Image (spheres, grey):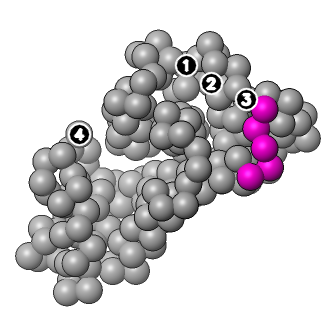
Amino acid sequence: MSRIPTHTIESAPDASRPLLQKIAQSAPTGRPLNLHAQMAHSPAVLAAYASLRAATAEHGTLDPKVSWALNLATAATVGNDYMIGIASRFAGMNGWTEAQIAALRTGTTTGDTKVDALARVVREATASSGNVTDATWKAAQHAGWSGEDLTEAFAFLGLTMFTGYFLNYAQTDSDI
């Protein structure tokens, strides 16, 4: 049972309505998902989420296939089935096979050693309060990731953790 009300655009607090409307317009269903409809209960939460999402979309340089791999690796580490479902769906839409999606969920190899190295960084950071061992970091650098790439990976980790933790916190019912 969800802890936070799930709003429609009309029932959301006034300050949340424009953001919720914008999210609904970009949703495949034309309506906000439960996670957005619950975040709308607090305009600050919805604005924070929308800002993280907009920043990664506007300023991100990583390929969407890579960013969804990072989102999925983070979601699996956070352990929220709703977020894992969303990230799995978008990973598939961005070129990952079902076997690779399963590997990203479990932390096994996808067959792409470069992406696997970066996924290990975000998985380790997620599980260890942001801490990453030098060995894991250097392995990602050795695989070809730049300092900028490693820094940007944190933005996708942050967006996914924010979302996954909110879903756990709110006990959001899945609608995917």
The answer to which of 100 and 142 lies nearer the viewer is 142
**Residue 117 shows which numbered tag?**
3
Q: Residues within 10 Å of mark 3 (few under 14, many from 20)?
A: many
Residue, disc 4? 176
Please provide percent x and percent y for residue 135: 90, 34
Q: Residues within 10 Å of mark 4 (few under 14, many from 20)?
A: few
Q: Earlier in the sequence, mark 2 or mark 3?
A: 2
Which residue type does callout 3 highlight? Ala
Q: Specify whether residue 61 is painted magenta.
A: no
The answer to which of 47 and 41 lies nearer the viewer is 47
Which residue type does callout 2 highlight? Gly
Q: Please tell me whether mark 3 sits on a helix, a strand or a loop.
A: helix
Which residue type does callout 1 highlight? Ala
Circles 2 and 1, Cβ within 8 Å, touching? The answer is: yes
Tell me if residue 20 comes above or below residue 31 in the rendering.
Answer: below
Q: Earlier in the sequence, mark 4 or mark 2?
A: 2
Most frequent secondary structure within the magenta stretch? loop
Residue, disc 2? 107
Q: Quadrant of residue 175?
A: top left
Give me the C-alpha separation between circle 4 and circle 2: 23 Å
Q: Is residue 137 left or right of residue 51?
A: right
Please provide percent x and percent y for residue 161: 54, 53
Q: Is residue 122 visible?
A: yes
Residue, disc 1? 103
Which residue: 39% across, 67% down?
A: 50
Q: Please tell me whether mark 4 sits on a helix, a strand or a loop.
A: loop
